[in-house]
Image: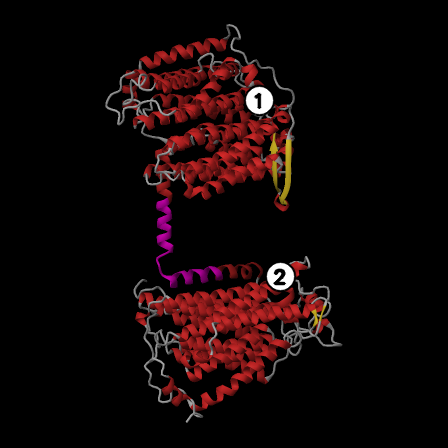
Amino acid sequence: MAVLLIVLLPFIGVLLAVASGRLGRRAAAVAAAGPTLVAFALLMSLAPSVLAGEVLVLSRPWVPALGLTFGLRVDGLGFLFALLILGIGLLVIQYAYFYMSRGDPLWRFFSYLMLFMGAMLGVVLSENVLLMALFWEVTSLSSFLLIGYLSDRSAARRGARMALTITGLGGFCLFAGLVILGQIVGSYELTDILASGELIVGHDWYLPMLILVLIGAFTKSAQFPFHFWLPNAMTAPTPVSAYLHSATMVKAGVFLLARLHPALSGGDAWFYLVGGVGMATMFFAAYVAFFRHDLKALLAYSTISHLGLITALFGFGTAGAAVVGIFHIMNHAAFKASLFMTAGIIDHQTGTRDIRILGNLRRAMPYTMVLALLGSAAMAGIPFLNGFLSKELFLKETLTAPMMAGTPWLLPTVATVGAIFSMAYSVRLVHGVFFEPGQGKMPKEGHDPSAGMLLPVAILVAICVVVGVAPQWTAAPLLAAAAQSVVVGELPAYSLTLWHGFTMELLMSAIAIGGGIFVYTQRARLYDLAHRIWPGLTGGAVFEKTVELVVGAGARLTATLENGSLQRYLVLLLVMALAAGALPFIQYGFSSGPQELTPTNPVAIAVWALLVVAALATVLTHRNRITAIICLSVVGLLISIVFVYLSAPDLALTQLSVEVVTILLLLLALFVLPKTAPRESSRLRKGRDIAVAALGGLGMGAISWAVMTRPQDSISDFFLEHATYPVGGGTNVVNVILVDFRGFDTFGEVAVLVLAAFGIYTMLRYANHTFVEGVPDTADDRYPVVLVSASRPLLALILLMSIFIFLRGHYLPGGGFIGGLVASVALIMQYLASGIDWANERMRLNFRVVAVIGFLIAMVAGSVAFVMDLPFLTMALLGMDVPLVGESDFVMTLLFDLGIGLAVVGSTMTILSELSHMQEVEPYDEAQRAKESDPWKP
Amino acid sequence: MEALIASAIAVLGGCGIYLVLRERTFTVILGLALLAIATNLFLLSMGRVAPGHAPVIEEGIELSAYVDPLPQAVVLTAIVIGFAMMAFVVVLSISAHFVTGTDHIDGGEHTQ
């Protein structure tokens, strides 16, 4: 349970930080530090059992079908990383509170930081690898937010984009790799994966899987050739660099190597890929770092170099090397975080990070100088500091690396030369900033910052010293526990002592230190040389060029496909649909089925002929829109006759009432839109459209023919069987399906109807009426007496009819949809006959409210099932009897249907009455209107 | 009878598609209406042709005698949704007409 809390607490911190928005800087810092502190304490409470070698696993099913569980795991490795994340996280929060400028909304910064912290904890404590991949993505996203935090600077935005692109693409590769891994093992749980090393390494898919996983690790840990995003990410505020780009996120890649070490290591591919990339990165980045003049850029390349060193150690594939790798992860996190913070302090106090400008700060900033000196010494690998221990162990491992029998001198040489440059840039960092006089003037005269800002640095440096002096009493137990989860079987012998005697690695260390100092003394000549022959080809430039090319290609593709013409998109869409529909015809051919045909009759032929004529007439007359609407209405009415013939009385009723409303709607639209359409299609276009239309129509007809001539095998027998009591409780199966079996569908569709009504209402209410064409009011008889006098009694009759249709729906054709539509028709008729104002005067109903009430009634009717602990919209409630009304399920369906009916009435009326409002007529005059429209009034 | 229905679907669908491809919003709406009718008929035809067997259960009639009720339920909601969407596009075209001053579907007379 504690594990779960540890992962969740930072996310709670996100919410707290956001909530603290108005309360100021201090509140934001507390909101971030509080949960972190609690999580840290919880982690400490797990320390005894983890250090004793226990593996705590918590697993909850999540999406079992995908193999995804919410599984968390605390073993030595996870514990070590969680300790780094939370411990350094606390220090960074403290540091950021002092570092970030006064005017900065800290809550935003801390909410991003906590999001990152939570995601990172998720990565290192996941038991399920899919879950880990999920958290991995969140670290990419949150680091994007943090790198681009100073979003008004274009360099920050570019750096953030670059980091996201590279790590995000790496994340995809990793995900693919982990899925393959899960397929190989048959489980996504780490416990199973770590136990199947032999199976994995021997599998056919081992190599592709390995490459994908490694791309994920290498992109995250900025290994060559994906390293360039890290220097570009230095645009982030320094606390972010100290946290993400030294201690935690970039360590996620090497964490992955460590985590999967028992399962994936072994084999030549692992050694050459991981070891090779690691050594190359270590050497190359150390070299580049020496030539960077920006403090943070120097530290960024140094980080890349050290990550390369760790990667190489895991790449050697031996247990001993893996232990050293973990040791260096710990050490590097401590000294590099402290150095980043020091760089931030220098930048903060002097206003520049350029080593060439900075100089002679030893007097102005003595405390900072001491801390920087110790941190750099640890980085360079000077004795009595933690960096020395792990670096010496690394040099020793290069001497004994496997598979290098042919060239045993290669790795030690590369390692030593890399170490020389490492020493050189460390010396430069201290000497160039604190001792050498600077060239040029610093923006601010620096002095030591407040104690609050120095404290986190001091703590980290103290750790470096203590571990460096007495490793066996400090780091050893943690290292042993972490190493145990990386190494299969017994831990190898390793010795964490300062003095191993006069060994080869001591000699290499000495060469590195001496050589580094020598290189530094030759710096002027080297800079000059580098200035002249530095290659123009950098990873960042290649990346930018690639992005430019991709974006350019995308823009060209878009410009070709998307020229702004909807007409064209529609043609493309239809042609694609035709192609997709044609595929099965081409593949399987077309044939009639064996089913016996239904005999035809003269009436049917007559209806068919009328239908065809009306449809064609709609097309032919479409320029004269009123005529076209009339033709269309003929089609709609004929179709309701067809529905009757096809044994679908409910459909016929619905079609009939919808037809009335639709035609009204189209006529209303013509108040505004032009009454005629110009001739504008070219002959060619017409030909093309006729071809598309003919093919589309023939395709639909052909498919329906093919289906209708084949025997049926439907799932509907279920509905027919269960429609009646006790399950459905009705005899009109269509209605029972609508309100009971498929009630949720109906519910959703009513929601769409209500939404459409509200969308229409908003669009028309806020429309600009400038272009309303309007209809010149030329009618002699605006409110025909016959229509007016007939509509009044009809209103009552039709409403009664609609209630009747509604009530009988469960047993005979009818129901809420149809009842609602019929009621709408009755109401609309009053608008038509007597005018909007007259009707509104007498019908003081807000139809939007009616629609919402109907929707809510349907929802309540569906939710009653919850009381009985049944799923939403279960209508048959154990056959309870309700007094006076009857069966409870009948009551519930009736209530649901009532809601639907009301929603239909409300929506339809909202739509039509809003449209009618478009017709701007002269102001309402009650007396005049009464005289005109009411024949019974004197 | 099946041939009549299939050909009616073909004619309605073809007319609908042709109108949908025209350049004025209102014509496109007319086309959508025809296309919706054709589609509804098409969906209903998936339940086969069985005149006189409405799915309203009566005593003493075998279940297999009724026509398939499922396409009917689907089509019923489709009709109502079709109306809602039709109303929406009608108002959308009216709004577009307000904004652009034209009822050309591309929002301008000479886009293409």
- Front position in the image: A668 or A412: A668
- Quadrant containing the N terminus of chain A is top right
Task: Please state which amino acid type lies under the numbered disc 1.
Answer: Leu
Instruction: Report the side of A328 relative to A678 (left or right).
Output: right
- The residue where tag 2 is placed is A863
Instruction: Report the side of A388 relative to A524 (left or right).
Output: right
Instruction: Report the side of A427 relative to A35 (left or right).
Output: left
In this picture the colour scheme is secondary structure
Q: Is residue A175 above or below residue B50?
A: above
Circle on res. B99: none
Hey, which quadrant is residue A575 in on the image?
bottom left
Single out the mark in the foreground, 2 or 1. 2
Q: Is residue A62 above or below residue A584?
A: above
Q: Which residue is at the far right?
A: B60
> Which chain is home to disc 1?
A
Secondary structure of the magenta portion, mostly?
A: helix
Instruction: State the image coordinates of residue A864 (x, y, percent, origin top left).
Output: 64, 62
- The residue where tag 1 is placed is A478
Mark 2 to mark 1 CA distance (whole Å): 55 Å
Instruction: State the image coordinates of residue A903 (x, y, percent, origin top left).
Output: 53, 69
Q: Secondary structure at mark 1?
A: helix
Q: Is residue A562 magenta?
A: yes
Q: Earlier in the sequence, mark 2 or mark 1?
A: 1
Q: Is residue A661 magenta?
A: no
Q: Is there one chain holding both mark 2 and mark 1?
A: yes
> What residue span does the magenta drawing correspond to?
A551-577
Hey, which quadrant is residue A442 in on the image?
top left
Q: Residue at x 37, y 36 (%)?
A: A159
